[in-house]
Amino acid sequence: MTSRFVAGSFTVLIAGLLSCGTASVNSAPETEEQSVSPAPAAEQQEAELAKPVYDSSAGSILARKQVPVLCYHQIRPYKPDDSPTAKAYIVPPAIFSDQMKALHDSGYQTILPDQLMHYLLSGQNLPEKAVLISFDDGCDEQYEITRTILDPYKMKAAYFIMTVAINRPNYMKAEQIKALADSGHSIGLHTWDHHNVKKYVADDWVKQVEKPKAVLEKITGKPVTYFAYPFGLWNPEAIPHLKAKGLQAAFILSTTRDQADPLYTIRRIIVPGTWSGTQLLTRMRSGF
């Protein structure tokens, strides 16, 4: 949310073969039997069969077990002037550390949106205990928290950036966003300035989605194909616009998924600072 902002070989071993005998590779005439090699067509067919089969039908996607997706905003100590509403989106660092330790010690492994997409479309195997950790808005402490808490556990996360705030006080700098992308984390879009998608008309889709997406792609040097709705609010009318702008999937909060386009309504839960690590595990198991 925006409580702090005012206004998403191949190697050929010929040498080894020659060292195993005195004859050169051309010393014996080939017989008809010797000249027969494995059929490339058969090898190609085997490779094709090994590829995952993708099924983008809503029914197939909805039938797959949901993967826990966690949503964080600010990771910082509470301040005396934080309202009860603001505190719902703030997790003190010590609590966040306890939550991540609980995930790690319980055998959870983090995945990124690309892996989640492959799973939803093909059933491709994920770790037995998979979890996707996401951060919204792009608050500056998210960068340091990643370095000090996530990286030691070898955890990866998805960051949905509100581009109007890049390089502003209390928000990540462009070079920090690039550093996250370069170290294997995922960078997604959270609009330009966090306006409610349900209210977009006409050029709003350019201002809030198309241009910010291009900004993030220029910063990271990578495609930006995932989107998080501000406030988790969405409507069916928004989905064709997201598709047209090159977004492959979108994340809501804990409301019901769309039965026609579940890839654009992937559920997340906001993790508050009142949950211990044990409580987080319990809520994950019951909520997904």
Image: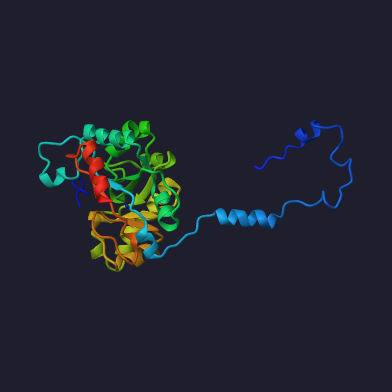
Q: Splitting the image into 4 quarters, where does residue 150 fall?
A: top left
Residue 136 appears in the picture as rendered: no
Q: Splitting the image into 4 quarters, where does residue 230 fall?
A: bottom left
**Residue 28 in the figure: left or right of residue 184:** right
The picture places residue 282, in percent across and down from the top left corner, at 23, 43
Q: How is the image coloured?
A: rainbow
Residue shown at the point (36%, 31%) measured from the top left:
152
Residue 47 appears in the picture as rendered: yes
119 vs 202: above or below: above
Residue shown at the point (39%, 51%) measured from the top left:
116
Tag count: 0
Residue shown at the point (83%, 32%) measured from the top left:
21
**Residue 57 in the figure: left or right of residue 43:** left
The picture places residue 38, in percent across and down from the top left corner, at 72, 52
**Residue 15 in the figure: left or right of residue 254:** right
The picture places residue 33, in percent across and down from the top left corner, at 82, 51
The picture places residue 277, in percent across and down from the top left corner, at 24, 36
**Residue 126 in the figure: left or right of residue 252:** right
Q: Which is more toward the observer, 198 or 152?
A: 152
